[in-house]
Image (spheres, helix red, strand yellow):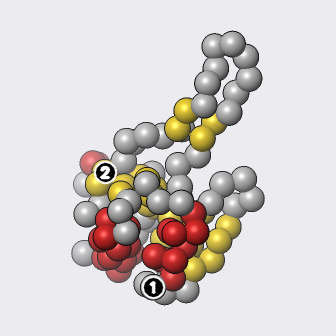
Amino acid sequence: MSEPLELAHRVARAVRDAGGRALIVGGWVRDDLLGVATDDVDLEVYGLPAETLRGVLARLGQVNAVGASFAVFKLGRLDISLPRTESKSGRRHRRSVAAARRGRTAA
């Protein structure tokens, strides 16, 4: 198992212990399905507010927050984000989570 994937599993367990859920999303999922080895691991975390997630991650290493409009945290080579909510105007639009259940469960 690659170092980023091992760290992703550690993050997922810590998130689960804090009451949240972490999913592996993005290119790693595609590459895994294609049988291609990759170290590009991104996580999306559900069920924790940003500050709680930051605290959970800080127990695992140095955390850097990036992204102005939504929370993305860097921990080592991992990108860890919270799901975005889209806010659209008009009668037929309502707030929705942008990418619910689009990844693979990490722990």
Tell me the quarter of the picture where residue 32 sits.
bottom left
Q: Give the amino acid at mark 1.
A: Arg
Q: Residue at x 74, y 59 (%)?
A: 68
Q: Which mark is residue 37?
A: none
Q: Which residue is drawn at 37% across and 42% down?
A: 101
Tell me the quarter of the picture where residue 93 sits.
top right
Q: Which one is in front, 44 or 76?
A: 44
Label 1 or label 2, whichever lies nearer to me, is 1
Cα–Cα span, label 1 and label 2: 24 Å
Q: Which mark is residue 59?
A: 1
Residue 107's spot in the image, x, y percent? 25, 63
Residue 96's spot in the image, x, y percent? 55, 32
Q: Residue at x 51, y 82 (%)?
A: 58
Q: Name the residue under label 2.
A: 104
Q: Is residue 98 left or right of residue 56?
A: right
Q: Residue at x 60, y 31 (%)?
A: 95
Residue 22's spot in the image, x, y percent? 37, 59
